[in-house]
Image: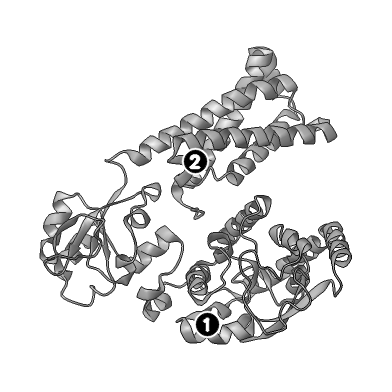
Amino acid sequence: MNTRINARAVVLLFADIVFVALGFILAAIGRLGMVEGLAWLGHEFAPIKILFALVASISTLYLFDLYDFSVISSRQELIVRLIQSLGTTWLFLAVIYFFFPQFMVGRGIAALSAPIILLFLLGSRMAIHYYLGHPEIGERVVLVGSGPAIDEMNYATLNRRDLGYRIVGFVSGEKLNGNRPLSSLEYLGQLSELERVIGEERVSRVVVGVSDRRGKFPLDMLLKLRLSGGLAIEESTTYLERVTGKVHLDSLLPSWLIFSARPRETRIMQVFRDFSQRILAFVGLITSFPFALLTALAIKLESRGPIFYKQTRVGKNGKHFTLVKFRSMRVDAERDGAVWASVSDDRTTRVGRVIRKLRLDEIPQFWNIIKGDMSFVGPRPERPEFVAKLAESIPYYEYRHLVTPGLTGWAQVNYPYGASIEESRNKLEYDLYYIKNQSISLDLVILFETVKTILFGRGGR
């Protein structure tokens, strides 16, 4: 899944808005005729009706991952998901129109708009599919040297055509004999031949392994090319962060984090963020009350014991707080001490499996947000027993406590539940990406992805 905001996704979004709106306009003209169709479109409520249907269409396109370019690259998958998305949209609109007929655009117009919009959206995405596959389109990238950030990444990860990058090969500081790194990429020559490679391969971006930039390197040549405006040069850590959405720990240097971290958040913004989080959490607590009531009743009917489960977690700056959840495990689940949850955990009750899948067990955490212990988005808070062990084994682990922990997070929507040191290490790479790039737009992406996770039942344990 690629959920990162990029220029191509934004362009596709605006194209969808235009095509969906155009679909309704053409359907109105086709159903009513030119004169009456234009008259209907000029009616004071028609734009509102079209806008409502437009928002529903764009939302379901997002829910079915149709802004993920890895989906667009498969034509069969694209067609299936487009049909599913539009079918879901029209089903949703039918329900809304039944209860609120004032929003209805008209049965004839709605029926005619469906195939028109499907053809428009299919055509736009097929054009992008051709665009992404065209050999002359996109930045041509050459990798320089090795370094763990490059060596451990495969060709599919590095060669992100959906983001506009095409890896043409790599050069190395030494002549290669026998085993070589990046065996899935074409070896283009030695470091001394870099200028020739850049010219012959029409390279527009050079990605340098962190370990190589400190050694013998043609700085004068690269500086000349860089200042001429014809070449982009960056470290492998920066490139990998952009194309994978995580920070690669093996190649991470403290100086890289220091000089490329996000802008300082002002006191006013902090107060505004905290206040808005508490208001939204209060609204969430009120609106989710019926579900909370049903969940509490189901827990009580199934097994003896408390409805709520309280657990100590580590919050911002290492401060401990009490996290509250609906109980999803047996009362004696940790009689032998704290252990990580696992897939199909036999300690989980039948009700617990359901509420975990639907995230209903986390409704009480709205209260943690109101208290200020948590926010909506951030690294998930971990237990002190595990933090001590993980901090000893994983570099930079304590950095995840520099921000307020969240109800959901970038690691949660990109990686499965962490139930080991290695999985926690992988999740930390996503957490560091979030900490470094924290913004309102990224928070919105995470919240939307969380909604998709809940609706499609992915990720819970």
Quarter holding residue 31: top right
Which amino acid type is shown beneath numbered disc 1?
Answer: Leu
Q: Is residue 335 left or right of residue 243?
A: right
Residue that mark 2 sits on: 12
Label 2: how many residues lie within 10 Å, few (<14), some (14-19) or many (20+)?
some
Label 1 or label 2, whichever lies nearer to me, is 1
Q: Is residue 154 left or right of residue 310?
A: left
Check if mark 1's residue and mark 2's residue have beta carbons within 8 Å.
Answer: no
* Residue at 72% over, 83% down: 335
Which amino acid type is shown beneath numbered disc 2?
Answer: Leu
Residue 230 visible in the current orientation: no
Residue that mark 1 sits on: 390
Secondary element type, mark 1: helix
Secondary element type, mark 2: helix
Mark closest to the chain's N terminus, 1 or 2:
2
Q: Nearer the viewer, residue 302 or 102?
A: 302
* Residue at 54% over, 67% down: 438
Residue 370 visible in the current orientation: yes
On screen, 47 above or below 255? above
Q: Position of residue 159 (x, y in %)?
A: 33, 53
Label 1: how many residues lie within 10 Å, few (<14), some (14-19) or many (20+)?
many
* Residue at mark 1 to residue at mark 2: CA–CA distance: 41 Å
Q: Position of residue 194 (x, y in %)?
A: 15, 61
Which residue reaches farthest front? Answer: 346
Q: Nearer the viewer, residue 275 or 195?
A: 195
Q: Position of residue 357 (x, y in %)?
A: 69, 58
Quarter holding residue 289: bottom right
* Residue at 72% over, 57% down: 358
